[in-house]
Image (spheres, helix red, strand yellow):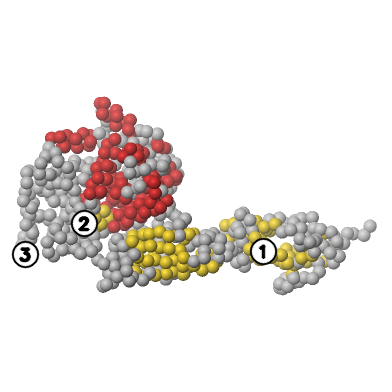
Amino acid sequence: MSALFGRRLRRGATTTAVAAAAIAALSASQAPGAIPSGAGGAQAAADANPPAESSATGNSPYYTELPPLTTPDKPGTTVDLPAIGTGPAEAGIPASVLAAYKQAEQALAETKPGCNLPWQLLAAIGKVESGQARGGRVDADGTTLSPILGPVLNGIGFANISDTDDGAYDGDSTHDRAVGPMQFIPSTWATWGQDANGDGRKDPNNIYDAALAAGEYLCHADRDLSLDADLRQAILSYNHSQEYLGTVLTWFEYYNKGTHEVPDGTGVLPAGTGPADPGPSPSPTPTPPPSSKPGPKPPKPSDPGTEPSAPGSGGPGEPSTPGGGGSTPPSTGDPSTPAPKPVVKRIEKTGTGTHTAMAGSEFTERASVRAVDAAGKPVGDVTVRFEIVGDTDARFTSGKSELTRTTGEDGTATAPAVQAGEQTGEFTIRASVDVKNIAGVEYTASVTARQADGLTRTGDKELTAAPGTEFADQVSVKATYQGAVAPGVAATATMITSADGSAPRTDGPYFKDADGNPLRELKDLKTDADGALQLPKIYADDTAGTFLLRIETEGGATLTVELKVTAPPAA
């Protein structure tokens, strides 16, 4: 789990029962250095040491801090949690991290609809595993600015897992360590790793890849996460600890009650994270800073257990953190009245790249649009429908020809990559929104025939025959494209008149057609699944000499082979 581990009691727990429960959970937690004792310790130890291969994280430690409480009017009543766009800073999730969770939810809704994975579950796990990627410290592609590594799993205080990746992910060639914002051990990542951002790599340090991998892991074994039993089983499969289960479920409930987006790098880390620690919450009775203008009235204090305002929440005694409310500007009127939601007026292309791919390959360019309002400002949370239109067998990588994506804070929605089929020609990728009088946009895409840029003969034996006989050996070649085998590539074979010519000969070696007639040019040949092509038998007429056979493929690969027809030596 996380390389930095916080251990803090839930703030605002004023009753003896709540405080005792929190202390018990903390004492039984798997924070670094915690040594179980007594009956409870035995259970914790049993939970913490299942078979290494049965847990996503190797049962590494995790953040044990719980969400903040707002003390209710009456002791023992339910927790009052914030609504979307409001509330304490802990409810905020960094933009890229939140986008990754929602993208994973959408992807699995298409590929595993029976799983019913909610993004809030990924958010809860991401919170306890890495503090939402250390408060959203990720680059523009969603990769953490520095690796997030759990402790060495050498059996001292944690599970004992010998190295499985030669240090490729965790830098340790002796033991494994949990890696990335979702804290996968390398052996688990080898099975469940995903490429969710389409960069051709499965990177546990990338929040998009890691979030989708976590979703796939939670959904496996045909789980339905809308069922309580399956939900609990999935969480325990991530880390075998009842305390872990309770912590994740608490954050899950918290995020289900409401959350909002904050800029990357500004998320609130759990306590105990070192230099980046935002520090303890302010005093329950903070002194408001001097101001030339009267600010909003502080809330009337209740009993001594009332929770203080969290950093960045705009509570009494503390200014709001800049950008803490996501893309919605602060209201200048009643703070309880949300700002009006922007209205989308048009969608526009965000790229002009050529969408071209060879048959059977994946398009490198992806269709992307931006939703904007009347002033040209981006509008988030807009559902965009992407469709593949035209006479084509190309499909999105999910296997569908139609799907939806939701715009992020920057107003952008990007379709998954498109996988070209075998049918060549042009088609259209259309993007639209279900809003009256808003025109859709279209990208033109084309599929070209499979190609080869290399052609080699698979044998080097001299090809000879006596006049009027057949050649003992058949010609076999192998086609490649950019160093890899090139299957399904069209080719021709021609008996040519000269090395710099291309016209077929009228004499010399020949192939036979279905009726046994001579043929000196073969078309519609195609390499097999291994890029190999074997020509039919070749026959010699009565003309002796050296002849040339040229083989050409789609894409320009060429190979010329010598054929010799020699009379047998005189008796």
Q: Which residue lies furthest to the top in this view?
A: 39
Residue assigned mark 1: 524
| Chain-order first, disc 3 or disc 1 | 3
* Disc 2 residue type (three-letter): Gly
What whole-number distance in Å separates the C-alpha atoms at marks 2 and 3? Answer: 25 Å
Which residue is found at the position 25% from the left and 57% from the top? 261
Point 46% across, 69% down: residue: 444
Picture quadrant where residue 142 is located: bottom left
- Give the x, y percent position of residue 220: 41, 43
* Residue underneath mark 3: 293
Give above or below for 437 relative to 56: below
Give the percent coordinates (x, y) of residue 108: 39, 50
Residue most toward the front?
A: 436
**Whether label 2 touches label 3, CB < 8 Å:** no
Query: Is residue 52 in sight in this rendering?
Result: yes
Q: Which mark is residue 85?
A: 2
Q: Can residue 178 be seen in this view?
A: no
User: Whole-Å distance between the Cαs marked 3 and 1?
Assistant: 83 Å
Q: What residue type is labelled 3?
A: Lys
- Per the image, label 2 sits on a secondary structure element best described as loop
Q: Which mark is residue 305?
A: none
Q: Which quadrant, please, contains the N terminus? A: top left
Q: In the rendered structure, are the residues bearing label 3 and label 1 in contact, judged by CB atoms less than 8 Å apart?
A: no
Residue 536 coordinates in the image, percent (x, y): 74, 58
Residue 394, image x and y in percent? 50, 61
Instruction: Say which amino acid is labelled 1.
Output: Asp
Q: Which of marks 2 and 3 is nearer the N terminus?
A: 2
Question: Callout 1: few (<14), some (14-19), or many (20+) C-alpha neighbours within 10 Å?
Answer: few
The residue nearer to you, when weighing 289 against 245, is 245
